[in-house]
Amino acid sequence: MQFHQLGLTPALVQALDRAGYKTPTPVQQQAIGPALAGRDVLGCAQTGTGKTAAFALPILQRLGARAPGPGVRPVRALILTPTRELAAQVADSFRTYGHFMRLATAVIFGGVPERPQIDALRRGVDIVVATPGRLLDLMNQGHARLGSVEVLVLDEADRMLDMGFLPDMRRIIARVPAKRQTLLFSATLPREIRDLAHGLLVNPVSVSVAAESAAADTVEQCVYFVEREGKQALLARLLDASAVTRALVFTRTKHRADRVARALTKAGTRAEAIHGNKSQGQRMRALRNFETGETRVLVASDIASRGLDITDVSHVFNFDLPNEPETYVHRIGRTGRAGASGLAVSFCDHEERAYLRTIERLIGRRIPVAGGMRDEAPAPSRPASKPASGRTRSQPPWQPPPRQQPPRQKSSRRLHARRDDERRPGGPWRQPRNR
């Protein structure tokens, strides 16, 4: 099938040909037609399968068919993403696909000055790609008005509808007209997220081109059973292999990402860290260095596991296993994209074995073991240290034996009075506060 067979206009087909896109992917073949017809779409497909074009192309064709009226252009399409990097990437895709169309696109996210974004909204834009936090700020200031939105898109919908984003999402959606087209796309759609999504959609078309929550078949997976103290040395040894041309390393916390990157650089491997505590300039610079090859290893928190299209990533290393199994699918989806092959390597210490079991249940198979043993006993607890007195911490200090004489008995009347006093809220005994 060719793009023109999907009903796209010559301007879009020409822009796709200019960008090197020849044939539509399965998710594009299934989603573009219903979206062009104005239907709501709930799409689930593996990462790297072209979900951005699946919603961007119908939006561009819909907006391009009707020119805006005189005066300032209102926002007619709103695309919400969970991260700044994904927002920038989606906005670039809209500009690429709409190269021969006279539509204006603006990207709105935090970490950068507000003034250029406010100026763009004042001049008028047709399409806004935004993260929820900064968009809400501009809405509250009166700069972003969503009363003319015709199409609402939630990219990485499972992340956008979880409890972290849900309050902001409700405030934003309340400002968008109820009569609209809604498109939701993600690589994973757990049942509870699907239930929330159906509350936003009207008679949607469900598009699923692969088993939900499945890892791409082009990604080879393996796991090393190694304790936390040995992970850094194992990572440095594996990165020395010539097959590792461009590697993403995922950690559970931002501080650990910094520590891992510093340790790799000290050992002679050029590495940079990217996470939410970095400024937007630092994050974009790290991504640019990684894409150009100046940096061979990018150490990231889960900010980089969602939707980023980084080409030619040969290896993904899970330095820490994620506590949410869906995050594992997103992480390893950074390699093996667009039909290429890749390798996902995970490190699992004894405290992370429960995470590994939930991941394997989600993907429906056991991950092959590359080092260590699955049935190893849990790591032994550390021996108690001895203080200066020679007594271990687990031994209580010497105390005199209790006196053998029985305690003085209180009268029954006084005892019952004391218990009633303790039960009374205003009495001398009170429940300690939770601090």
Image: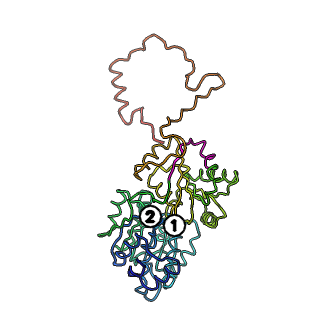
Residue 9: image x %, image y %?
A: 42, 84
Nearest the eye: 167 or 201: 201
Task: Work out how far the residue at label 1 is from the one at label 2, CA to CA, in angstroms.
Answer: 10 Å
Residue 294 falls in which quadrant of the image? bottom right
> Residue at (53%, 70%) from the top-left corner?
89
Above or below, 33 relative to 65: above
Sort mark 1 into few (<14), some (14-19) or many (20+) by Cα contacts within 10 Å.
many
Q: Earlier in the sequence, mark 1 or mark 2?
A: 1
Residue type at mark 2 is Glu
Instruction: Tell me the element at label 2.
Output: loop
Label 2 CA crowd tier, 10 Å (few <14, some 14–19, many 20+): many
> Image quadrant of residue 224?
top right
Q: Which mark is residue 156?
A: 2
Stretch of the chain drawn in magenta? 221-235
Label 1: state its secondary structure: helix
Instruction: Say which residue label 1 marks.
Output: 86
Percent from the top left, x then y, of residue 102?
49, 85
The residue shown at (45%, 57%) is 215
Label of residue 227 in the image: none
User: Which of the pair 47/129 is nearer the observer?
Assistant: 47
Q: Are marks 1 and 2 in contact (CB under 8 Å)?
A: yes
Eyeballing the image, is 307 above or below 365? below
Say which of 232 and 382 sits in front.
Answer: 232
Report x, y in % for residue 431.
42, 36
